[in-house]
Structures are given as C-alpha cells and as structure tokens.
Image (spheres, rainbow, N blue to C red):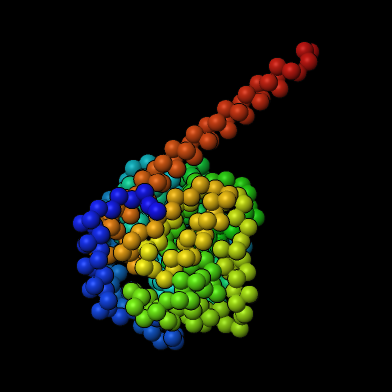
Amino acid sequence: MTTIPLDAATLDEASRFNRKLAWAPRFRIRNRFMPMLGQALLRLSQLGADRKLARAGIRVEQGIADVDGLRVPVRILRPAATPKALILDIHGGGWVIGNARMDDRHNALRVQACDAVVVSVDYRLATRAPLQAIMDDCLAAARWTLGAGLPAYRTLPVFVVGESAGGHLAASTLLRLKAWPELMERIAGALLFYGVYDLAGTPSVQAAGPETLVLDGPGMAPALRLLTPGMSDAERRRPPLSPLYGELEGMPPAWMIAGDIDPLRDDTLQMAQRWREVADVELNLLPEAPHGFIHFPTRMAQLALARSHAWMREQLVRYELKRNESETGSLAQAALGSSLSPAP
C-alpha cells in the first residue's frame, strides 16, 4: 500500500535499526516537568540553526502572524531561487515540546526540492496553553500565510504540512479554514505524516502495548485524556478537535504516510479512507516503520521524503493547469458575453 519502492536491503536496514530502537526510552507524557526538560534540551541542540541554513543558501526571518488580535510567532525560510510555492509547516512533539526550528532539516530539503518559501508555526505548547488555544494559533498562522501576511507571494499555491501532533493540527486547521473559501482555493495539497486524528484513540492506539517503538504504547490513550481534561470520549471525538470525524468536503489533495508498526497507524488509514471520498489521496503505509521514522538515518526515510517532494512538484503542475483552465474559461465566458451583447 505505497508508491515508495522498498527493496529487501532497505527493509533489512530498517529492521536492524528497529532492534536498536527497542533499547531506547519511549516518549511519554505523565506530567509537566518532563516536557519542559525536553524543550530545554531541544533548544540547546538548536544553537547555530540559522547559520546552518545560511550555508545552504536559505535566508531565515522571524515574523509575527497577527490575525484578529492573536499574535503568533513564525519562522520564515526563503530560497535563493524565485519561489514557486508556499509551505505552512506545523511541527510535531506531542503538543508539549517542539518549536518552529524543529523541522529545519526537513524544511530546508523542501525549500530546495520545490523552490518553496516555508512558514513554520511557533504555536503555544500544552504545558502552558489548552489545546483550543494551540489550534487557534495554527489557524491564525494559516490565515496570515494565505491572506495578506506575505504580499509578495499572494499568488503562490500553498501546501500545509504536519507531522504527528502537527498532523492533527494541520487537519484541524484545514477543517476550520473552510470558513474562508477564498483562502482554501490557494491550497494545492496537504502532506500529513502519521498524524493523530481521533483524540479518543483509534483501535491501534487503544491496543498499543509495551513493545511499541519510540512512543510509550500503554501511555498513549491516557496522554490523550491528559491533553483534553474533563472531556468524555464523545466530546473528544467532536471535530475539529478530532478531524477524523469532520466534514471533509472541500479538502485539497493529500499525501499521507504512516508506519505499519506505529500505534497511530489506524489514524492515518481511517483518515485516508474518509478523505478519499472527497479528494485524491496518496496513501503510504510502510512496513518496518515506527512513529517518527523520517528522522532516522535510514534509506526508507530518504525514499519517503523524496516521494513527498515529488508529490508536491506533481501537485504544483496540476494546480497550474487548473488555474490556467479557470482563466481560459473566464476569458471565453467574457468573450461570449461580449459577442451576445446587442449592437449599439
């Protein structure tokens, strides 16, 4: 169930890496202290991030997405070449760690592969803000990016990219953006990496055991309850909180990926099934792939990222063709109207 070619050597390498991962600690959320410590360590690891991008020919700017009085910091990566697209990036980190620098490495590859400008959202984290506020930050950043926030790029097509918790926020943001149809028209596609789409827990989350890699399987459902305190499962499943149950009509084409040994596997499978009812979806379910695998030094990760770049380039061609057809149709309609007008 993938368009990504995986030979025996690639799968064997992934399997060997997974055996090493089995000895590593799992990501878990049990209190506020550990996420705060993780965030501090993350920031230390990011020292010199801007200089690394500059050496790759990528210009970095800090901005503020200011919409309806809500001010959200954004990190803007600009290519040396003339931009062909905009990318709105929403980072992962379980809603409790991460920042706009977190995806620099992958965003730099997207800048170079697609001549794209990347806007990465520095949304508030769940250690100091409720989930609704986090979702509001992402919506504000999307409206700013798609609206008047970057006037030099107001005609460029836009991709929305989200990974893990960022996949949840990306899908939720797209659902809410439907209130602004003129903004939705600019979205050429969504790239969703192993997102969380049911905050009450899909079957694979509910059944996750201690053998799960990267994520703490038994702690996943309790962590979702910590994220949404005081709610019943029925309330957690209301969209846009759980985008899996939203009205998807009007969504853009999507590229989705998940690992077969990721406890969030069912989230992607079920979301792809529903999304396909309204738009084109390329679904990639990869064997021997745990959660977060695109960050690992494996050929599988390289192939998956390369396919995501190729998919974006394909969508840019389709977007341009669609826009040209629309403009041609408008001109033809105007010409027909003129020819039918009575002579003076």
Q: Residue at x 58, y 33 (%)?
A: 326
Q: Residue at x 51, y 42 (%)?
A: 155
Query: Farthest residue in the top direction?
Result: 343
Foreground: 216 or 95? 216
Give the x, y percent position of residue 329: 60, 28
Look at the image and tell me in which quarter the C terminus lies. top right
Left or right: 253, with 42 as reference point: right
Left or right: 329, with 273 as reference point: right
Left or right: 206, with 286 as reference point: right
Q: Residue at x 30, y 80 (%)?
A: 25
Tell me if residue 17 comes above or below residue 191 in the rendering: below
Give the x, y percent position of residue 153: 47, 45
Foreground: 224 or 205? 205
In which quadrant of the rendered view does residue 248 lie?
Answer: bottom right
Q: Is residue 151 visible?
A: no
Foreground: 38 or 283? 283
Tell me if residue 191 comes above or below residue 230 in the rendering: above
Give the x, y percent position of residue 118: 41, 54
The mark tally for this picture is: 0
Q: Is residue 97 visible?
A: yes
Q: Residue at x 31, y 78 (%)?
A: 41
Give the x, y percent position of residue 255: 44, 52
